[in-house]
Every structure is written in C-alpha cells, then in structure tokens.
Image: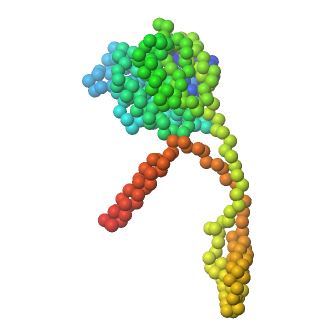
Amino acid sequence: MGNKAATLSHTIIDERLDILAVVETWHERSGSITLRRVVPAGFRCIDAARAITLDVETDSVEFQNYCGLAFIHRDNVWFQQRTFDVTVTTFEYLYGCATNPHGCFVLLAIYRLGSQAVTASFFDDLSAVLEWLATYASPVIICGDLNVHVDEPGDTNAARLHQLLELFGYSQHVNEHTHTSGHTLDLVMTRSDTDVSDVHIGACISDHALIRFSLCVKKPCADQQWTTSKKWRRLSRDDFATDLATPRLCSNLDAHANASVDDKLYSDVLTELLNRHCPAVKVRRKAKEKTPWYDADCRAARRQARSAERRFRRSLRQQA
C-alpha cells in the first residue's frame, strides 16, 4: 500500500466513500506512516497488521511485512474493533461493529493468501466465523479477497464456498472480474436481510479493482403504542393505609350480610382510593425489535447462566 497511499486517499475523496476496506496493506503496526498517509482529513482508521515473529529483523532495509487489513472511515462512523472467540489460522481478518446516526452494522474483511492452496481447514474456519456472526441481529457485511475463483463454474472450491454461504443465508453480490488476471477474487457477501445496492466494479488501483456498493442501515420506525398504567412507585403506603381504615369498610361489619353488596363496596372503595393516590397515566411504549435467533434454547441457557451466577454470589457471601 506504500506506493498507492496517495491514490487511495484521493479515491476516498473522489468516490465520496464513507468506509474503505483495504486488504494487503503491508503495514507493520498501527499508526505506521503508510496508514497515516492514506487517511484524509475527517477520517479515522482501524487496522490489523500481520503478526511479526521475534526472529525477523525489522530494522533491516529489506524488511517488508505482508498481508494486513484496514478500515478507513469517516469521523461520524463509530467503529468498535472486535475479535472472534475462535481460532482462525487459514486467513487474516479485521472485524468490528460500526454505528452512525442512522443505525449500526457489522463489517468483516477477510484476506486469504493466494499462494496457499484452499484446504478443508479454510472452510472450517470460515464456518466457525459465520456461526459467530449468526448471533447478530444487525446487518452483517463480509468483504475481501478470498482468492477463490468463484467465476469458474467447475471450480470445486467455489462450489463449496457457495454451499457454505447458502447454508448460513448469505448471498454473494460481485458478478464481474475484479483482478487483472480475469478472475473474480474480491467478494461482497451479506445476509438476505441486508439491503445492499449499486454494486459497481471500478478501475484497478493495483492488480485488484475497487468494489463500490451502498448499504442501507436506516433504522425502521418502531411501532409506538399508547397504554394506560399507574405509577406504583409514587404510591405512599402510609397514606393509603390511613385512608383504607375508612368507616365505610371497618365499622359495623355485621350490617353487611349480603356478599354481593360487600364485594361491590370493597371494589368501589379500593378503586376510589387507588385513583386518588395513584392516578392512571398514559404511557407511550415502543415495540421491541424482533430477535428470531433468540429461541427457547437461548432462554434456557440464559436461565442456567443466571442461576450459576446467583449460586456463585451466595458462595462468596458464605465464605466471607
């Protein structure tokens, strides 16, 4: 990326990009001069440099770190970089949750070395990552250079990748060649509930083309309902108990021989007292967003976790 820094920076401005995902950055560490040259004014950067082993002489003039990924995003997009709780060895990735004034989404960039053969371990790692991403209710976008020839119908690796994406409900949106060799290597994958449009294959910046697309992350308007409820926290128990000891209920109890009359008397008196001490108010409530992945198994697991937490806290109190 070193000799393409100015080109990338101008591309961000000219194309009016909100986020640019870059693979094969070849930078050594966060805050390197190479990355800083790419980031224009009004933008920020998060990155994942390839780990450098201790036996490598980084002070050498000939040293060059390979791979690496970066997200260059506008200031009004807040990114929280995260890592998966699974071990991934067959590709590098950069992953985070992005939030802007309109909504939030998850962005994952992947780079797999083309010099390495596609193995079963690659699909195992990718499957584990997709399982992890399945817990998100917000839109999920996966992009990057997987070095799988998805444009070749007879390619077994491309067919296996398509089956894996279909299993998790993902679609691949790039249908044109993205490499100077005439293959489709750079992909954009989203779930069916993610609104991606205007996918455009631009000019080649290096040996790969710029892929531009639009993502709709606008939050849907939540349904609002008006309900009537009482502000029970404002109820004064002492005042309520004083008014409850009214002669209408507590005097001459023998005179109330009719059960139906007694029920009506108690109902009328209690309703009057409650309306006086805790009047009803109208409250506007927003409907909660649907989470179809939160099923009975998730609820049972949550109950077990809460029960284990309570037992743990009780054991601490007993030890004290």
Looking at the image, is 148 positioned above or below residue 255?
Answer: above
For residue 225, say whether it is visible: yes
Horizontal and vertical percent position of residue 282: 72, 59
Horizontal and vertical percent position of residue 230: 67, 65
**Residue visible at 32% across and 21% down?**
59
Horizontal and vertical percent position of residue 60: 32, 17
Horizontal and vertical percent position of residue 204: 53, 11
Front-most of residues 169 and 101: 169
**Residue visible at 50% across and 24% down?**
143
For residue 73, say whether it is visible: no
Looking at the image, is 65 positioned above or below residue 128?
Answer: above
Which residue occupies the extreme top position in the image?
A: 181
Front-most of residues 315 and 52: 315
The picture quadrant where one finds residue 216 is top right
Q: Which quarter of the rendering shows the C terminus?
A: bottom left
**Residue visible at 60% across and 45% down?**
289
Indicate left or right for 297 with 258 as reference: left
